[in-house]
Amino acid sequence: MTDTASIAGRSVSHYSVSEKLGGGTGVVYKACTYGVLGRKPEALATLKKALDAGYGNPNWAVRDSDFECLHVNPEFRKLVGLSDAPAS
């Protein structure tokens, strides 16, 4: 388990970097922060925004421990292409 200080520092870092990146990459950093914090609805919604904004590496999200809280979530699996059903 990650300690609170590490999570807080990571959140600040991700949000700072995300302001400077385009193509959905910055939005992915925000989604990662939500995932690490265990905020599943926000992580999923923000990841979807990142993909819609042009982030082109959904396979990375499948392996990323920041999204561990979502790895078995059916909507997440659809979003990253692990299911034949279309993402909503």
Image (tube, rainbow, N blue to C red):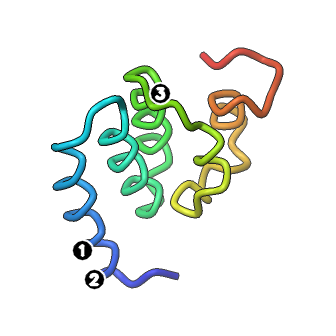
In the rendered image, residue 37, in percent from the top left (x then y), is placed at 41, 62
Amino acid found under the numbered disc labelled 1: Gly
In the depicted view, which residue is nearer to us: 4 or 32? 32
* Mark 2 or 1: the one toward you: 1
Query: Residue at position x 71%, y 36% from top?
Result: 77
Amino acid found under the numbered disc labelled 3: Leu
Residue at image mark 3: 51
In the depicted view, which residue is nearer to us: 13 or 42? 13
Residue at image mark 2: 5
Residue at image mark 1: 9
Amino acid found under the numbered disc labelled 2: Ala
Q: Would you identify the image quadrant in which residue 54 lies?
A: top left
Of callouts 2 and 3, the N-terminal one:
2
Q: Would you identify the image quadrant in which residue 10 lies?
A: bottom left
The 10 Å Cα crowd at callout 1, few under 14, some 14 to 19, many 20 or more, is few
Dot 3 and dot 1 residues touching (CB under 8 Å): no
SS type, badge 2: helix
In the rendered image, residue 8, in percent from the top left (x then y), is placed at 26, 72
Report the Cα–Cα distance between label 2 and label 1.
6 Å
In the rendered image, residue 67, in percent from the top left (x then y), is placed at 56, 54
